[in-house]
Amino acid sequence: MTDISHGAGAPAADRAANRYYFIAWRWHFYAGLYVIPFLLMLATTGLIMLWISWGAGLGAERMAVTQGEAVLPLSTLKAFRL
């Protein structure tokens, strides 16, 4: 038993749909080839920027606080809150 819905005996609508599927797949492939290097470049430069900001101490990651002479009460510390 053979299936005649595919191949040479397939209706014209099925062949056209199959053709458009492969055209869409091809454009999707080419778009991926264009987009993937761009996304890799963005990820790499973003990682470099994070590493540089961490090393430079930007964003208060390495904020040094010197200890004062006396311990301040909690009510005084609350007054300095921004």
Image: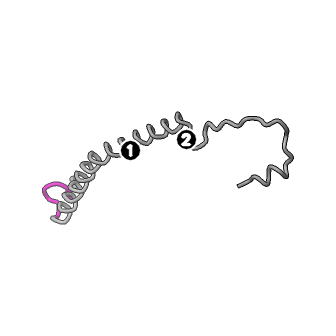
Give the number of the mark in front: 1 or 2.
2
Specify the label residue 58 is tagged with. Answer: 2
**Relative image position of residue 32 (x, y in whole percent):** 29, 48
**Relative image position of residue 58 (x, y in whole percent):** 55, 41
- The answer to whether the residue labelled 1 contacts the one labelled 2, judged by CB atoms less than 8 Å apart, is no
**Relative image position of residue 3 (x, y in whole percent):** 22, 55
Q: State the residue in front, 9 or 17.
A: 17
Lower position in the chain sequence, tag 1 or tag 2: 1
Q: Give the range drawn in magenta.
A: 4-11
Question: In the structure shown, which secondary structural element does the residue marked by tag 1 occupy?
Answer: helix
Q: Name the residue under label 1.
A: 42
* Rendered image quadrant of residue 17: bottom left
Count of numbered circles on the image: 2
Residue 5 shown in magenta = yes
Q: Which residue is drawn at 49% across and 36% down?
A: 51
Vertical relation: 16 (above or below) 53: below
Amino acid type at circle 1 is Leu
Q: Which residue is drawn at 79% across and 54% down?
A: 79
Quadrant where the image shows the C terminus: bottom right
Q: State the residue in front, 20 or 10.
A: 20
Q: Farthest bottom residue?
A: 13
Vertical relation: 53 (above or below) 27: above
Vertical relation: 11 (above or below) 3: below
Q: Distance between the residues labelled 1 and 2?
A: 21 Å
Q: Is residue 64 left or right of residue 80?
A: left
